[in-house]
Amino acid sequence: MPPDQLVGAWTLERFLTTYDSGREIFPMGEDAQGWLLYTPDGYMAAFLSRANRPAFETGEMLSADDAEKVRAWDSFFSYCGRYEVRGGEVVHHIEGSLYPNWIGQAQARTIRLEGNRLTLTTPPQKTGRGVQTSEVVWRRAVR
């Protein structure tokens, strides 16, 4: 796939994780929100979040209590870096991430592009809850 087909802004339609047991979950809820950006010069940024995240009440970003910070962490995910297209995959070379363990990693996603809909699928990943595959569906943003 030519990389220029990914360039632009995409909005989240669905974020679904399926386990090898057949169990399916929506990690950020069925009404999750998000943006995915691919630039012509090879950079990308993604964020996914729960809808209607509550504002902090106990303080500001750094001074709020731990419970509010944990709820904020559990309801948002983001990462950014360079990207490259290799055949039917896009590889995100992660330079910044809410989850620090991803920094420095290369994360591959299978690409399926149908009209204005982009589906990115992770390879199977072993987790503490079983082997999982995530499918994230994006729609090209329209101004």
Image (cartoon, grey):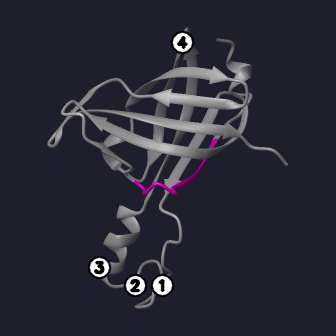
As drawn, the label of residue 63 is 2
Q: Nearer the viewer, mark 2 or mark 4?
A: 4
Q: Which residue is mark 4?
A: 88
SS at circle 2: loop
Task: Look at the image and say whether residue 24 sits in the magenta stretch.
Answer: no
Please tell me which residue lies in front, 52 or 77. 52
Q: Position of residue 58 (x, y in %)?
A: 40, 91
**Quadrant where the image shows the N terminus:** top right
Image location (x, y in percent) of residue 66: 29, 79
Tell whether label 2 touches label 1 (CB within 8 Å).
yes
Disc 4, SS? loop
Q: Nearer the viewer, mark 1 or mark 4?
A: 4
Q: Amino acid at mark 3?
A: Asp
Q: Which residue is mark 1?
A: 60
Say which amino acid is labelled 4: Gly
x and y percentages locating residue 79 in the rendered image: 49, 45
Nearer the N terminus, badge 2 or badge 4? 2
In the rendered structure, which segment of residues is drawn in magenta?
Answer: 28-36
How far apart are labels 1 and 4 at the CA level? 43 Å
Q: Which residue in the protein does label 3 denote?
A: 66
